[in-house]
Image (cartoon, rainbow, N blue to C red):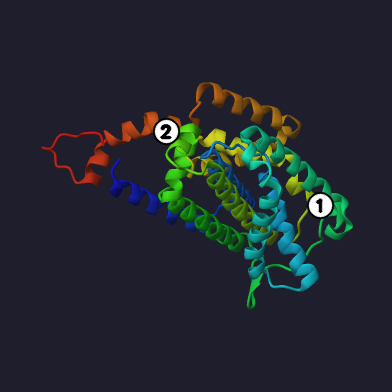
Amino acid sequence: MTNRIKWIMLGILILLLIALPWIGLGNYLLQVLINSLTYGMLGLAFALTLKVGLPRFDAAAWWAVGAYTSAELIQKAGWPFWPTILIAGIVSVILGWICYVVAMPRGMMVFLLFSMVIVLAIYQILGSVKFFGGWGGTGVLPPVSIGNFEFTSQTSLYLLGLCFLALNVVVYYLLFHSRIGRAWDAIGSSLKLASSVGVDVVKYRMVNVLIGNFFLGLAGSYTFACNQLATPSLASFSSSVNVMMYVVVGGMRFSLAGPLIGAVIITFIPEYLRAAREWKDVFSSIAIILIIIFLPQGLLGLFEKYIIPWFTRSRFFARLRGKTKEEPLTSS
């Protein structure tokens, strides 16, 4: 597919996303989309560490750290919301470095075990320490505002979430196409080969994880803006497992689009199984297992294998490329 077609499709997608609140979706579906935006940000951070061969189970922990940082600074220090976004990211980075400075040089398995311990520890700390409000959370705080405008409607929160998500996607895209991104690709392909050409594996892995932590902290701040409170349930182990599912379902080879598509699907499927809520986890698990077995490249892998070749052979694609009737139609 040519770059021209990709940019046209991207432009159409952006316009559609912006227009969604005004096409009659209703507040309920908008809330589901808001959840999808948040989970997409978590999935992007998980996919980021996969590029250096580090699966992680602590994404929800740093998500909660970001939410609590914003909530506590507003509640106890009287800060406005907007500066707390940056502080939330920085706190997630500093705590992440403290946690992983010992684990990172010891390889993937030690990192994975550390991440599992961290999410369980942070969940327990947030619920048990009185300073953080206990298991009930921080309590409801005033809505986020700019001047006299308050982000209370679903439409305003959805558009705010799009801005957060766009920042994630743009930064990740630039990183993936930079020198550091090439180093990550080398590490993900072969640790020995990357080391042999002078790549400092531990350093680049640490940078990768801490960048993910920063954006997980930002996602936590956005979640706080939506809910006006932070609760320990954000840091639950099941939330971290769900983050992994977003990437698997969307397609692990697609570091940007995969987590976003997977987050939308995993968010919407349970909502349409509300009539059988006690079975929704079973149905979701079965669907994910079937995807792993029959679609190991995820849903985007299926799209790439069948839909794109069909589209590139279509007359519509030929018109977009400016082909005339006399010219042969070829796949790009």
Looking at the image, how many numbered discs can be counted on the residues?
2
Looking at the rendered structure, the kind of residue marked 1 is Leu
- Whether the residues at callouts 2 and 1 have beta carbons within 8 Å, the answer is no
Residue for badge 2: 303
Q: Position of residue 90 (x, y in %)?
A: 64, 60
Identify the residue at the far bottom of this view: 147
Q: Is residue 285 above or below residue 24?
A: above
- Quarter where residue 318 is shown: top left
Residue drawn at x 63%, y 69% as measured from the top left: 82
The quadrant of the rendering that contains the N terminus is top left
Looking at the rendered structure, the kind of residue marked 2 is Phe
- Quarter where residue 57 is shown: top right
Q: Which one is earlier in the sequence, the residue at label 2 or at label 1?
A: 1
* Residue 128 appears left or right of 310: right
Q: Position of residue 169 (x, y in %)?
A: 49, 52
Residue drawn at x 22%, y 45% as measured from the top left: 321
